[in-house]
Amino acid sequence: MIEPDRTEWQVRCAFNAFCKLVLKNEAINIYNKRKQRQAKEMTISDLTPQEKNQIYTLDKQYEGEDGEFFQVAGKKITPQLLAEALRNLPIEKRKTVLLYYFFDKSDIEIAELLEIPRSTVQYRRTSSFKRLKRFLEEHADDWDD
């Protein structure tokens, strides 16, 4: 076995001591940060009922007296308008959208079910969105009921 010369050995020892010191200081920093964070944190069970009510909000998506609707970008979208937009899609695109969003099917499952390539399913879904968006933008303001 070849013995390292004295200066190389001293360099190794100094580097070893430096590494140990860095790791020790990093562990101390982590410990201190964790302690500070725990001092600021509070469990949900420790909150008062008033504080618990402040940590969440409910969206008021549906409004209106006559019927339900929701607003997107200042446009009033009713369930009837959305149903009409879906009815205006070609049947194969409508099937794809309904299977994907209402029956939680993946593109692969839809492709197997309809016996078409997966890429066709993706194309139908994305192009359907464009058509639905365009229809809703055009008819949202003048749709009553």
Image (cartoon, rainbow, N blue to C red):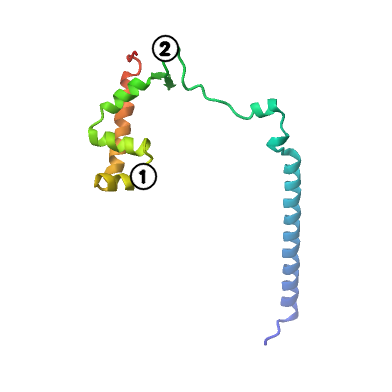
Left or right of 68 in this view: 13:
right
Where residue 119 sits: x, y (%)? 28, 46
User: Height in image: 142 above or below 102?
Assistant: above
Asked whether the residues under the numbered discs 2 and 1 touch, taking CB atoms below 8 Å apart as contact, a structural biologist would say: no
The quadrant of the image that shows the C terminus is top left
Q: Secondary structure at mark 2?
A: loop
User: Residue at 29% across / 29% down in the picture?
Assistant: 131
Residue at label 1? 106
Binning the other alpha carbons within 10 Å of mark 1 as few (below 14), some (14 to 19) or many (20 upward) gives some
Marks 2/1: CA–CA distance: 37 Å
Where residue 52 sits: x, y (%)? 66, 29
- Residue 126 seen in render: no
User: Residue at 70% across / 81% down in the picture?
Assistant: 4
The residue lying toward the viewer, choosing from 6 and 128, is: 128
Where residue 9 sits: x, y (%)? 73, 77
Residue 130: image quadrant is top left
If you read the primary sequence from the N terminus, does the residue marked by circle 2 or circle 1 appear first?
2
Amino acid under label 2?
Asp
Left or right of 65 in this view: 28:
right
User: Residue at 43% across / 20% down in the picture?
Assistant: 71
Amino acid under label 1?
Ser
Residue at label 2? 66
Residue 114: image quadrant is top left
- Residue 141 seen in render: yes
Q: Secondary structure at mark 1?
A: loop
Where residue 19 sits: x, y (%)? 72, 64
Count of number-bearing discs:
2
